[in-house]
Image: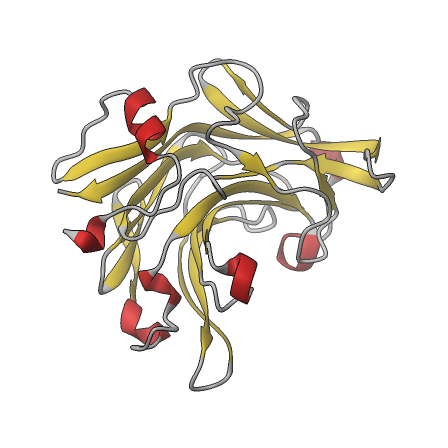
């Protein structure tokens, strides 16, 4: 069916190289199991660079193994406290990485699933999220944003899911979200997922549904971004407008955000 087609630039590569992970009712269309040590696979992952958003303290580096690498079957995104001078001459006291599938893979509807272990400590702000590919033309929030997982270190037992869009009727940025309390996401690996249908999104923590979002809330017209392709971002922010609300605990560095796998499915 057309509504389940992925908007991809490298779907054939993804299907050809992923292992045969199965999920009843779904077809695996792209994955990275992180089985090759070194830098993240450049055929699958691109980088954000520099000081990007939210008044965050970290400089996102590119192709730097200290901040993003694959080792022992996991993607490691490492936040570091260090005196860093970037190739462009900018200086920072913290470094980290943000890897994306912008330009390599994007999905319209389907299941996005990531197994991860989160860092800990005040100032940590890891996320698993998606942005509409239209961001390069119409910007944020008109492009849409799907936050599969957000976590801030000063609230260590809570995981969040959020959706952001531009409400054309109200003429402003609007958001909706849910959260799950009483968890221990920094102690072990957990599965974070969104199942995105033509009428809603369902957000899961270890198969527990804790937030649903009806797509018509973002509008019934062509401006609704949640009927259009989105790409994935895995990043570790440090400080910033939310992560830094209670400061940054420098004694916790370095901190590792570990990802066991990333998988995209479409409904059969």
- State the residue in front, 19 or 183: 19
Inspect this view and state whether residue 172 appears.
yes
Inspect this view and state whether residue 244 appears.
no
Image location (x, y in percent) of residue 89: 87, 39
Q: Residue at x 68, y 42 (%)?
A: 49
- State the residue in front, 255 or 84: 84
Q: Residue at x 44, y 21 (%)?
A: 34
Image location (x, y in percent) of residue 126: 55, 43
- State the residue in front, 185 or 228: 228
Image-quadrant location for residue 260 = top left
Q: Where is the C terminus found, in terms of image quarters?
A: top left
Image location (x, y in percent) of residue 105: 41, 40
Label total for image: 0
Image-quadrant location for residue 18 = top left
- As drawn, 7 above or below 224: above
Q: Residue at x 62, y 58 (%)?
A: 242
- As drawn, 11 above or below 196: above
């Amino acid at each position: 069916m057309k509504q389940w087609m992925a908007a991809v630039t490298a779907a054939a590569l993804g299907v050809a190289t992923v292992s045969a992970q199965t999920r009843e009712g779904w077809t695996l269309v792209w994955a990275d199991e992180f089985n090759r040590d070194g830098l993240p696979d450049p055929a699958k992952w691109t980088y954000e660079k520099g000081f990007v958003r939210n008044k965050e303290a970290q400089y996102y580096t590119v192709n730097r193994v200290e901040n993003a690498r694959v080792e022992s079957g996991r993607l490691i995104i490492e936040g570091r406290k260090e005196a860093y001078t970037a190739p462009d001459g900018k200086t920072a006291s913290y470094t980290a990485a943000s890897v994306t599938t912008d330009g390599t893979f994007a999905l319209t509807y389907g299941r996005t699933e990531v197994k991860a272990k989160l860092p800990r400590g005040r100032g940590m702000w890891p996320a698993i999220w998606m942005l509409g590919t239209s961001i390069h033309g119409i910007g944020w929030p008109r492009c849409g944003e799907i936050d599969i997982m957000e976590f801030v270190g000063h609230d260590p037992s809570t995981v969040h899911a959020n959706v952001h869009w531009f409400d054309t009727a109200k003429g402003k940025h609007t958001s909706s979200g849910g959260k799950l309390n009483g968890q221990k996401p920094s102690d072990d690996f957990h599965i974070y997922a969104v199942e995105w249908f033509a009428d809603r999104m369902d957000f899961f923590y270890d198969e527990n549904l804790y937030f649903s979002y009806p797509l018509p809330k973002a509008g019934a017209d062509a401006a609704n971004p949640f009927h259009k392709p989105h790409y994935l971002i895995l990043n570790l922010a440090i400080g910033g407008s939310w992560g830094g609300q209670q400061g940054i605990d420098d004694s916790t560095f370095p901190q590792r955000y570990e990802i066991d796998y990333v998988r995209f499915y479409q409904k059969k």
